[in-house]
Amino acid sequence: MQYCGRKVEGEIPAKKTFHIREPNGMSNGENKVAGEQLQLANVVFSVDVHQWEGVKTAINSILGSSKTPENIQIHLIFPVVGGVGSSEREEIQKLISSFSCSGIVVVGAPSSSDVINSHDNTETNPFRNRKHHRDVILHTAIMDEFVGLIRVENDRSGNLNSLANFARFLIPDIMQEWVGKEMGVVLYLDADVIVRKDVVPFLSAGSVQQIFSHPTTYVLAAVARSAPVYGTFFNERVRAIFEEEVENLPMDVTRPTYNAGVLLFRPHQWLQQGISGKIKQWMRKHKAEPLWDYGTQPLLLLATYNRWKALPSPLWNVDGLGYNTKLSATNLLTSGYILHWTGPRKPWLDDGLYKPIWNQFHPQQCSGHGTCALQHQCVCDENHHGKYCEYQGRP
């Protein structure tokens, strides 16, 4: 299944970073459809070079599973250190080229618009001129204040130390202008997911109010899991710091935790409660002495203790597809709303698990019959032609 070149009501966002306004005066978080003012469903990924194939496939699954993809806005967070230099620009060009040759248009590249000038024309990007298309927005996350606090972990799964993981902490800052309201939310997803459920009703105002009804101080929602519990993640030393230096309240070691690959952020509440500051406080302590494993997951669990809400269904994050070979014996692969390849055997790798499910949504570059040039054009193999080499034979 290929779902490229989305149809979307409304104008294309202006090419700026972060504070983009619709030309008709609407805020970023709103879209006018059939005379109504509707809140866009904002979905965000944090990406690096190792995750592009996963993100493209996840985007395809989100749009292909929605009855109203015109109400969805996809965002990409690209972490940088020390600003956008020549190497970062080169990576951004490669990202834009890879996405474009798969039918996904990316705008809003960091630093200045000339980063994507070769991309911004209808000759190389036919989707760009479609009236109902909404582009994927690329934002930069300046990681300078975090990078010096990172303690390098024993990286068993291969990506714990990626800056893209730490860039999640800046999502509320970047996305606050897009959600607009006190109850505004943004759905964060890891790159190794497939979405099988329409996210537009899930992210609607009514649904969000039900999820965060009492109390209203929750900063995020996630799927609760009964194991591992807080006591599994944190030893006596961490609990002592938590209780005596940071939160001044006892930690319930039996409390359920959550996997951080599917998170429903409330940017305004996150910022009001200073959660990023708490994360940096814990990073400094972890830098001074090793307190845990598993990268950024413990940081989120500590900083959001008593501040996160369980999502209404565990089907919003069916994980383990990257290591659990027995899931086919259950109905989770067909009933799960979001399938999540936690573990080392990612579906785009040679030894990946459950590849047929992932391949349903994987947008092959140049339809699998060509190569993608840096000018964002497909160079077709012999006996194929078309913008995406989608036609067999000579033109």
Image: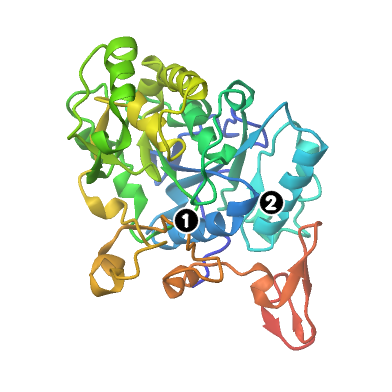
Residue type at mark 2: give it. Leu
Report helix, strand or loop for mark 1.
Answer: loop
Q: Specify few, some or many for label 1: CA neighbours under 10 Å numbering under 14, 14-19, or 20 or more.
A: many
Residue 235 lies, with reference to residue 326, above or below; the image says above
Rendering colour mode: rainbow
Identify the image quadrant of residue 340.
bottom left
Would you say the residues marked 1 and 2 are in contact, meaning their CB atoms lie under 8 Å apart? Answer: no
Residue 230 spot, x, y in % from top left: 26, 34
Say left or right for 15 vs 6.
right
- The answer to whether residue 26 is visible is no
Residue 370 lies, with reference to residue 171, above or below; the image says below
Looking at the image, which residue is at 35% across and 50% down?
Answer: 199
Residue type at mark 1: give it. Asp
Q: CA distance from mark 1 to mark 2?
A: 17 Å
Residue 20 spot, x, y in % from top left: 59, 31
Identify the image quadrant of residue 87.
top right
- The answer to whether residue 265 is visible is yes
Residue 223 lies, with reference to residue 391, above or below; the image says above
Residue 28 spot, x, y in % from top left: 51, 33
Where does label 1 land, which residue? Answer: 192
Q: Quadrant of the C terminus?
A: bottom right
Where does label 2 land, which residue? Answer: 95
Give the camera-side residue of 310 and 109.
310
Give the camera-side residue of 204 and 321.
321
Looking at the image, which residue is at 46% across and 72% down?
Answer: 355
Front tag of 1 and 2: 1
